Image (spheres, coloured by chain):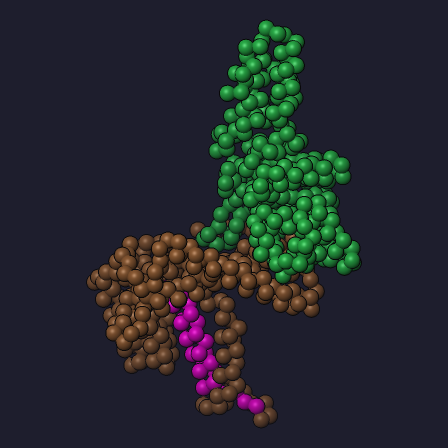
Chain colours: A green, B brown
Amino acid sequence: MAIQLQQVSYTYSERSLWRQTALHGIDFELPQGTMVGIAGATGSGKSTLLQLLNGILRPTQGTVSVLDITLRAGEKAPKLLPLRRRVGLVFQFPEQQMFAETVEKDLCFGPLNFGMSPDEARERACRAMLDMGLDLALLERNPFRLSGGQMRKAAIASVLAADPEIVVLDEPTASLDPVSRKELIGLLTRLCRERGRTVIIVTHRMDELLPYADRWVILDQGRSVFQGSVRELAADPSLLTRCGLAVPDSLRYWRAVADRLGLEDEEPRLTPEGLAELIVSRESGSSGRVGEKGTGHE
Amino acid sequence: MCRGKAVVPAGLAKRGPAMNDRLLLGRSIETGSWVHKLDPRSKLIGMLLYVAAILLSRSWPAMALLAVFSVVVAVSTRIPLQYYLKAAKPLRYLMLFIFIVQLLTVKEGAALLTIGSFSLHEAGLRLGAFAVIRTFLLVAFTALLTFTTTPARLNQGLEGILSPLRFIGFSPGRFTLMVSLALRFIPTILDEVQIVLKAQASRGADLSELPFKEKGRMLVTLLVPVIAGAFRRAQDLVYSMEARGFRMDAPRSRYHRLRWGWADTFFIAMFIMLGIAAAIL
């Protein structure tokens, strides 16, 4: 297991009048090399959960095990440097993540701290920039002079530059244009599928991640209310509505088509192409159903 | 409400968001007591009178009177007393320092202890103790002002008190805006520090894990991004105020009006009497 949480709770400002419990008794296990989506309404504890995964926050109750490092509430934490080398966290707001005077320094910060030589760090930084589709000329710029989208990409690059085994991203596609969003999801999918990285993504746009994620975790008011495969999620999307989330279009379409055609144990088709293919294949099989083609898409 | 049932790892209490908990400055705690409902002007004047009373008291009975008065008023706010203690806690080393300096430098009264040419005197001990009690009472008790008054109300009170100065060309509105922005920025800058610390920690530079020398270097590297961040926020603040039509010195209506009541007069009278009693004792 790459990540294992047992009865984890987190309370902000625990010893004061302003205490606020963000997570209540979360349990889950995420196997290595999977792509995981985390969704939940605003304030459901998603960002808190992510910050527990690389030791930025420590559980106030329960146990967080990431790779071979265990953080137990109430115990002195072990050295966290190895954990941070292996788990890269992309914060929710790029402006809260970039702090150096130039993009290059920011990108090299992680690799240098994790013991790489300056040359190697610079090379990694360049590679990460190119991976994120950024011009190398931007390396000399001040991160705060970049556009919103460029800054977002640079922030992600700064984490990818250290090449962590587990990549954790907090709403990475916010403030990106549609093309970049697709590219980013593609890049993360390749990281996961080709290089065996575990990728955990918090998102408000479930649609763009649904075709790629292996597992989903749904949070509602600090509790985990769903954990499982896309298939299980597709079986009962009304769960999302109960948690204050909109049911993604792809799931709605799939549900409509599956209910109409009476599909039970089929793998959900969550891309327009996949869905179209399915409908066409059903139709060529039984030409009598032609009239239903249009009604599948409400 | 807050009494320590909670178990926090020692490491956690010193870091992360917990850092802001220790900063009680400018945080009001609503309990709805009579002090909360007072006019902010009377509380401000009351605190000034309290400072005067502290400066006027020069004897043990006066100290005792101050202490009893402070505790009674603090209890009447229905805020747990430990919050007042916490407010004075950051100054504990300063108080210790004052005590030691007084103890070592005042050479009056009977000698208590003599080692060679070095001696400790009764007056030194007494004045040292007074200085500590005064500092403690001053800091702990005046925290009442910020505990029972929201920053906005406090500002309004300050503006009210300063309004007579308008006749000499002074703009109370401008002044209080400046003060409120400055106060508002204290938590903002602390947040900014936390943000940069978090960002650095998550990429392998955890302040608490670095050797001492590195720590110093890291703290210096923190300065630039934090100050840059504060300026950015200030700029954003200006834009957002202007976007909502704020103009300096333009006449504005208010949500809360200042209203002086009998309780306010009583509150002030209490402090005047305290001052007189402290001076006499």
Q: Residue furthest bottom?
A: B117
Position above or below: B190 against A201: below
Residue B241 visible in image: yes
Residue lying farthest left? B262
Q: Position of residue A14 (x, y in %)?
A: 52, 51
Measured from the top left, where is residue A48 in percent x and y? Answer: 57, 45
In the image, taking residue B215 as reference, residue A93 lies left or right, namely left
Residue A213 at x, y percent in the picture: 65, 32
Q: Quadrant of residue B35?
A: bottom left
- What residue do we see at 62% from left, 7% from top? A287
* Residue toward you, B114 or A198: A198
Nearer-the-camera pick, A225 or A182 = A182
Please provide the residue range marked out in magenta.
Answer: B118-145
**B52 to the left or right of A87:** left
Quadrant of the rendered structure where residue B70 is?
Answer: bottom left
Q: Is residue A12 left or right of residue A30?
A: left
Magenta-span inclusion, residue B196: no
Q: Nearer the viewer, residue B204 or A95?
A: A95
Residue located farthest toward the top when viewing the structure as drawn: A288
Which quadrant holds the C terminus of chain B? bottom left
Residue A271 position (above or below residue A78): above
Majority secondary structure in the magenta region: helix
Q: Residue at x 39, y 54 (%)?
A: B243
Q: Give the residue displayed 42% in from the left and 70% down from the top.
A: B139
Q: Residue at x 33, y 77 (%)?
A: B52
